[in-house]
Image (cartoon, rainbow, N blue to C red):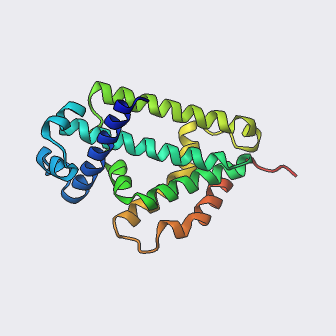
Amino acid sequence: MTAVQSKSRGRKRQIIDAALRCFSEHGVSATTIDMIREASATSVGSLYHHFGNKEAIAAAVFIEGMRDFALQVASRLDSANGAEEGIKALVAANVEWISANPDWARFCFHHRAQVRDEDATARLRGDQQLFQQRLRDWFAPYRSALRDFPPEVFAALIVGPTHDYARHWLAGRISTPLAAQLDTFAEAAWRSVRAEVVS
């Protein structure tokens, strides 16, 4: 990456971070380009140069959040060994990222529909395909240790309970922090997908 590219990416991330703050405080529909411009200390011209419009900024916030989360998953899996540690690492990555990034988590839980235009949709689809392939590759050596569920069922069993609890916690309906339940959700995820032991 050249110095110019690095500066451009840094400016984009600055705008994305500022937009997330604005969306979290005011809501997406009530947030204006001028609010994002002021929060990011950049010009309207720069905003339009990097993104085009508010809708594109909202899509970028969602996509960047999912990419940031994917890095957390990769980091957790890098230190895991075996099927059980891998499954529990996925739960831990979710719990840790949501706990550390509550505003981003709220946005990603509730604003998938912000990714609308063809380019953003293609970027998100490509990211998701790469993410799923990385998971398949990581777990491939341990398939015999896991039950044979369809991918969507497998994912729901692993992170569904964590996400359900997280939504309530992020909304203030549950006071006990999500992180306090990590061991419970990790163990439950492992028990739900591990292959049955035949004695």
Residue 122 quadrant: top left
Decide if residue 113 is in sight here. no
Q: How many marks?
A: 0
Q: Nearer the viewer, residue 30 or 171?
A: 30
Please name the residue shown 34% across and 41% down the image. Answer: 10
Q: Position of residue 48 (x, y in %)?
A: 17, 33
**Which residue is pictured at 19% across the width and 49% down the height?**
41
The quadrant of the image that shows the N terminus is: top left
**Rendering coords of residue 108 (x, y %):** 36, 48
Residue 136 is left or right of residue 66, and the answer is right
In the rendered image, residue 6, in percent from the top left (x then y), is placed at 38, 35
> Residue 42, how many percent across, how many down?
18, 44
Which residue appears farthest toward the right when viewing the image?
199
Where on the picture, by quarter, is residue 92? Answer: bottom right
Q: What residue is rendered at 30% in x and 39% in y?
A: 12
Residue 53 vertical placement versus 103 (above, below): above
198 displayed left or right of 6:
right
43 or 104: nearer the eye?
A: 43
Residue 2 or 186: which is nearer the viewer?
Answer: 2
The outermost residue toward the bottom is 175
Left or right position of 25 against 81: left
Q: Residue furthest front?
A: 3
- Residue at figure coordinates x 44%, y 60% from the top left: 100
| Side of 17 where 65 appears, left or right | right
Q: Is residue 68 visible?
A: yes
